[in-house]
Image: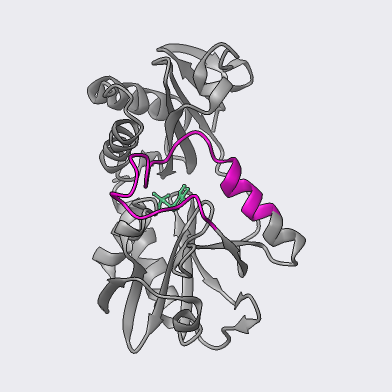
Amino acid sequence: VESVALLDGKRVPLAEAALAITDDGAARGDGAFESVGVWGGAPFRLDDHLRRLAASLAALRLPAPDLDLLTAEATRLVDDAAPGADAMLRVYVTAAGTRLLYVAPQPDRPAPVALIPQPAPWIRPLGTYGPAGAKSMSYAANMAATRAARADGGDDALLVALEGWVLEGPTFTVLWVADGRLHAPALDLGIVDSVSRRALLELTDLEVAEGRWILDDLARASEVVVCSAVRAVVAVRRVGEHSFGGATLVRDRLSAALDAARRGAAR
Ligand SMILES: Cc1ncc(COP(=O)(O)O)c(C=O)c1O
């Protein structure tokens, strides 16, 4: 995988792909972005990601992006930099209208098997304010939650709403199995409309329950899993003081199905 970028259509090495400080994307985190998984040389559900990017920009009251142009640039870049390979594609569109796409190896980071609940007062239900659910370029609050969870001895955070509802991870979606059903926090909580979540809810043979649950509900789960575009389905072993031991049958099935879908898309 070659680490390379397209900055407003111009190919540059990733190390030289900089946003000017006069670009509000850099100065204020004003813009939206996507992280797309590339599997066997194919971006998985690129259209879903780019539609979500458009939805994020609309939620931030920024102009609609040129999706045909972004699709063409993303496809060209991935074909060029990661033929047949697993990689990560990032797509940024800033308030100044700057387009920055890059391809790089997938991040090599430990699986988040121990999660520490962290309050996420900035995540509010859809409809309560415009930017709810947007994947904006201002991720400092999410990253601070990860750091706080690590300081408390975990691998990462489990974000929890002011009302106590379980939401998502700072960079991943969270699902769990209870009463034989696959539980997914409802999108109207204002969480990111995860593309992996969507794929997993389509692929599962379990009945799906979407709703609002608190940590005590989650504690009754037989399995908790997390996933994102650039990682496999991970079995969570601890949330706060609560441990989840035992077999991970649902994780194993979901992981195999998602992997097949990701790699099938490459053929
Ligand atoms: C806050 C948040 N939730 C969930 C996800 C998972 O989304 P996806 O499956 O589309 O990667 C992400 C991904 O970056 C995220 O940042």
Q: Is 134 contained in the magenta span? A: yes
Counting the numbered discs, the total is 0
Q: Is residue 53 above or below residue 8?
A: below
Q: Main secondary structure of the magenta part?
A: loop
Residue 42 lies in what quarter of the image? top left
Is the N terminus in the top left, top right, bottom left or bottom right quadrant?
top right
Position of 53 with respect to 22 (left or right) is: left
Which percent across, then down, holds residue 54?
29, 32
Give the residue at x 33% y 31%: 57
Position of 44 with respect to 233 (left or right) is: left
Q: Is 95 contained in the magenta span? A: no
Q: Is residue 251 above or below residue 120?
A: below
Which percent across, then down, holds residue 141?
59, 46
Position of 128 with respect to 232 (left or right) is: left
Give the residue at x 34% y 21%: 73
Which percent across, then down, holds residue 143?
62, 47
Q: Nearer the viewer, residue 145 or 89?
A: 145
| Magenta range | 120-147
